[in-house]
Image (cartoon, helix red, strand yellow):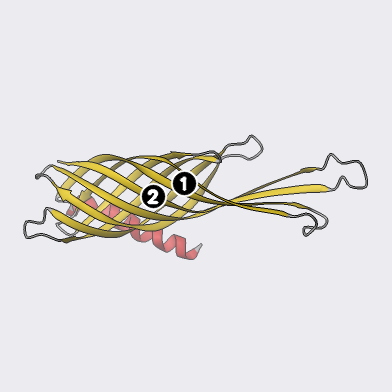
Amino acid sequence: MKKQTIVIATLLSSAMAMPAMAADWFIGGGIGAQQNKYEGSRMHEVDPGFNAEYAKDKETNVLYELRFGAYIDDNNRVYSTYSYNSDDHSRQQSLLLSYDYLVGLTADNKLNWFIGATAGVNHISPATNNVDSKNSFVWGGQTGLMYKFNDNVSTEIGYRYLKQDYDASVSYGNPEPAPHNIGITESASLNDSQQLYLSVDYRF
């Protein structure tokens, strides 16, 4: 938890300083693909090793995002992103705060490579009524290429990795007759997500 607090505090400090230093504000949107890595188990409460079942699954579906931020200068930017993703296991809505460092790859700085860090909150709504929706902390980083068509319009392709912190479990009785009707516990976790996206931004 201490590490998470430090990451969020650092990004928030950058965001709070942004209005005073910002040279160019921007707003944009993007579309892409998000892959979520799930793990789950089903076991007896009395004897967890008896007929225990474990499963792993990866789901890849469409990602939508909107973002708003500012270029502090030619090499630094800070922005907030809202993203939406839904698959067979859950529906996710994320609010992220990111920082990128940009490196010009051409003399006119139209083509840039960027790399940065991200932290935020992910709201997960499981695709079952047995588990409640939940907010969880996410953190990670991103990299990609950004191309400026002119002073106002740019596009980029990026890859983002997010470490998730989501776990859920539910317990219920086994319908088998006694003495076999001991409790059952099912648990699931979302370990990480990977995003590949294409976005367009407008500077003003």
Amino acid type, mark 1: Asn
Question: How many numbered marks does the figure carry?
Answer: 2
Amino acid type, mark 2: Gln
- Mark 2, secondary structure of its residue: strand
Callout 1: 10 Å neighbours few (<14), some, many (20+)? Answer: many
- Mark 1, secondary structure of its residue: strand
Q: Residue furthest top?
A: 129
Picture quadrant where residue 152 is located: top left
Picture quadrant where residue 133 is located: top right
Residue found 82% across the figure and 43% down from its top: 174
Q: On the rendered image, what quadrant is the C terminus found in?
A: top left
Foreground mark, 2 or 1? 2
Between 109 and 25, which is closer to the camera in this rendering? 109
Tell whether label 1 touches label 2 (CB within 8 Å): no
Q: Which residue is mark 1?
A: 122
Residue found 63% across the figure and 40% down from its top: 131
Rendering coords of residue 157 (x, y %) = 27, 49
Q: CA distance from mark 2 to mark 1?
A: 14 Å
Rendering coords of residue 187 (x, y %) = 66, 50
Residue found 75% across the figure and 55% down from its top: 52
Rendering coords of residue 198 (x, y %) = 28, 44
Q: Which mark is residue 148?
A: none
Q: Is residue 25 left or right of residue 151?
A: right
Residue 111, above or below 62: below
Q: Earlier in the sequence, mark 2 or mark 1?
A: 1
Residue found 48% across the figure and 53% down from its top: 137
Q: Is residue 40 left or right of residue 200?
A: right
Q: Residue furthest right?
A: 179
Rendering coords of residue 190 (x, y %) = 54, 51
Q: Which residue is mark 2?
A: 195
Q: Is residue 198 left or right of residue 37?
A: left
